[in-house]
Image (cartoon, helix red, strand yellow):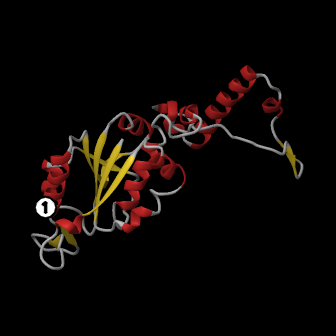
Amino acid sequence: MRFDIITVLPELLQGPLHHSIMQRAIDKGHVEINIHDLREFGFGKHRQVDDYQYGGGAGMVMMIEPLFKCIEYLKSQRDYDQVIYMSPDGERLNQPIANKLSLLKNMIIICGHYKGIDERVREYLVSHEISIGDYVLSGGELPAAVLVDTITRLIPGVLNDESSALFDSFQDNLLAPPVYTRPAEFNGWKVPEVLLSGNDKLIEDWRHDQSMERTQDRRPDLLNN
C-alpha cells in the first residue's frame, strides 16, 4: 500500500512513521510512505500556502491553489483510491473503517493546519474526511500518523503473527481480554489458572467471557452496536 501525505510540517511525521512496526513494514516493502511538503507548491519566495479568510475572523486558512497543484501532481503519477482529509468534524475513525481502508492500494492524506483548508478542497477534491476524536489538535499530522499506523498493522505480512490483529480491541465490537506473561506469580498476584491449564477450549471461552465483561463495564456502547 502507498500513502502520500501532504503537510506543511513534514518533520512532525518522521518520528511516528519510521520506527518499530512501521519501519519494518516499510523495510519489507509492505507499505510505501511519501511525505510531501506543501510549501513546494506555495507562492513566492516565502512559498506561501495560507491566507486570511474571507469575511474576517481569527486564523489563517490553507489556500486552494497549492493543495490543488500538489494533488494534481500526485494524480498525474498514479491512480488513487481515496483522498482523505484529517478533520475533527470528519467520520470518527474506528476499526471497521481501518479494516476497509486496509484493502486499498493508494491513498492521499491531507493534513490540515491553521484554521483549516479552503472549503472548495473539501467539496471538490476530498473523497473522505476522517476524525480521530472529538477534540482539536494543532494540525492533522498526528491524526494522519494514527490513521497510517492503524491501517498498516492490518496489511498481511506486517505483523509477525498475522492472526494477532484479528483479536485486537474493537474487532467484532469487543474490547480485548486481559493478557498475562511470566512469572505466573509476582508479589502474591497470580495469573488466572485457566490460562495455565493448556485447555484451548477453556481458554478461548474464558477470553470471550472476559471480553464481554470488560466491554460491558467500560464501553457498553459497543455492545449496542
Place of residue 103 in the rendered image (x, y in percent of width and height, measured from the top left): 36, 33
Q: Please give left or right for residue 178 compared with residue 223 in the image.
A: right
Residue 49 lies, with reference to residue 145, above or below; the image says below
Asked whether residue 223 is in view, the answer is no
Residue in the image at 47% along x and 38% along y? 154
Residue 42 lies, with reference to residue 132, above or below; the image says below
Outermost residue, right side: 188
> The C terminus is located in which quarter?
top left
Between 216 and 169, which is closer to the camera in this rendering?
169
Residue in the image at 17% along x and 59% along y? 67
Q: Please give left or right for residue 81 compared with residue 73 in the image.
A: right
Residue in the image at 83% along x and 27% along y? 197
For the image, the number of numbered tags is 1
Place of residue 72 in the rendered image (x, y in percent of width and height, measured from the top left): 14, 52
Place of residue 97 in the rendered image (x, y in percent of width and height, measured from the top left): 38, 38
Asked whether residue 211 is in view, the answer is yes
Q: Amino acid at mark 1?
A: Ile
Place of residue 153 in the rendered image (x, y in percent of width and height, measured from the top left): 49, 42
Which image quadrant for residue 30? top left
Q: Please give left or right for residue 35 compared with residue 153 in the image.
A: left
The residue at which mark 1 appears reads as 64
Q: SS class of the residue under badge 1?
A: helix
Q: Label 1: few (<14), some or many (≥20) within 10 Å? A: some
Outermost residue, bottom side: 45
Residue 69 lies, with reference to residue 114, above or below; the image says above
Residue 203 lies, with reference to residue 170, above or below; the image says above
Q: Please give left or right for residue 165 compared with residue 118 in the image.
A: right
Between 98 and 55, which is closer to the camera in this rendering?
98
> The N terminus is located in which quarter?
top left
